[in-house]
Amino acid sequence: MTGTPEAARHVTGGISMTILVINGPNLNLLGSREPTVYGNENYAALCARIEGYARSKGVAAELFQSNSEGAIIDRIHAARPVDAPGSGGAADALVINAGAYTHYSRAIYDAIRAVGLPTIEVHISNIYQREEWRHNSVIAPACVGQIAGLGFAGYLYAVDYLVGAASAESGEGVGA
């Protein structure tokens, strides 16, 4: 999404929500990097799918990709709630595929905890069916949940969960 964070917000049924979707190292190479693991669709296709799906749910998705741990942390920090000092308040929730940083970046774990946004960790491949070193996620304890092995659809399930949680919190959920 382009423009100011306020311009990116969609309001539906009283819910104004922007979901920040962060993708880490090597995800920019989707479509050419290990297609048997990650599929044949490229990063632009992933972004289009997430943005379209979010829009169909009445929310905005802002996508960010970096191969740099520091840039990822800076973007998470910038998403802090509006009332936080120095915040742009650019997001209400976070979906993150930290790539290999998943397995060792305690700094990304700390950043997720520091901003306090509901966060879903997503992986295109099933990290538990891959190399042993991929089985551990150091960021998972900072997240509401983890979705792994469902391909691009995992991002859409994360959007569904976050939208549903926001609806329930605002009193607009099932039974409200």
Image (cartoon, rainbow, N blue to C red):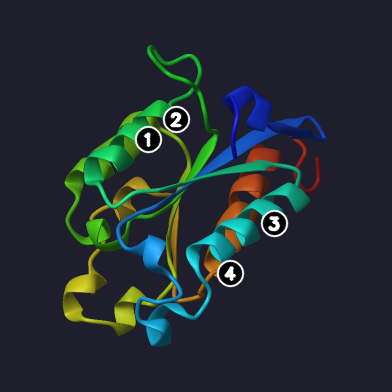
Q: Residues within 10 Å of mark 1 (few under 14, many from 20)?
A: some
The amino acid marked with disc number 3 is Tyr
Left/right placement of residue 63 relative to residue 80 reads right
Instruction: State how far apart marks 2 and 3 are (Cα).
Output: 21 Å
Say which quarter of the image contains residue 47. bottom right
Q: Nearer the viewer, mark 1 or mark 2?
A: 1
Q: Which residue is mark 2?
A: 79
| First of labels 4, 2 by sequence position | 2
Question: Circles 4 and 2: CB distance less than 8 Å?
Answer: no
Q: Residues within 10 Å of mark 2 (few under 14, many from 20)?
A: many
- Measured from the top left, where is residue 33 in percent x and y? 35, 76
Q: Which of the numbered marks, if any, corresponds to residue 53?
A: 3
Q: Is residue 170 visible?
A: no
Q: Residue at x 69, y 56 (%)?
A: 53
Q: Which residue is mark 1?
A: 75
The amino acid marked with disc number 4 is Ala
Instruction: State how far apart marks 1 and 2 are (Cα).
Output: 7 Å
The amino acid marked with disc number 2 is Ala
Instruction: State how far apart marks 4 and 1 are (Cα).
Output: 24 Å
- Measured from the top left, where is residue 70 in percent x and y? 23, 39
Question: Circles 1 and 2: CB distance less than 8 Å?
Answer: yes
Q: Is residue 162 above or below residue 97?
A: above
Q: Residue at x 64, y 39 (%)?
A: 166
| First of labels 1, 3 by sequence position | 3
- Measured from the top left, where is residue 108 in percent x and y? 26, 44
The amino acid marked with disc number 1 is Arg
Say which quarter of the image contains residue 125. bottom left
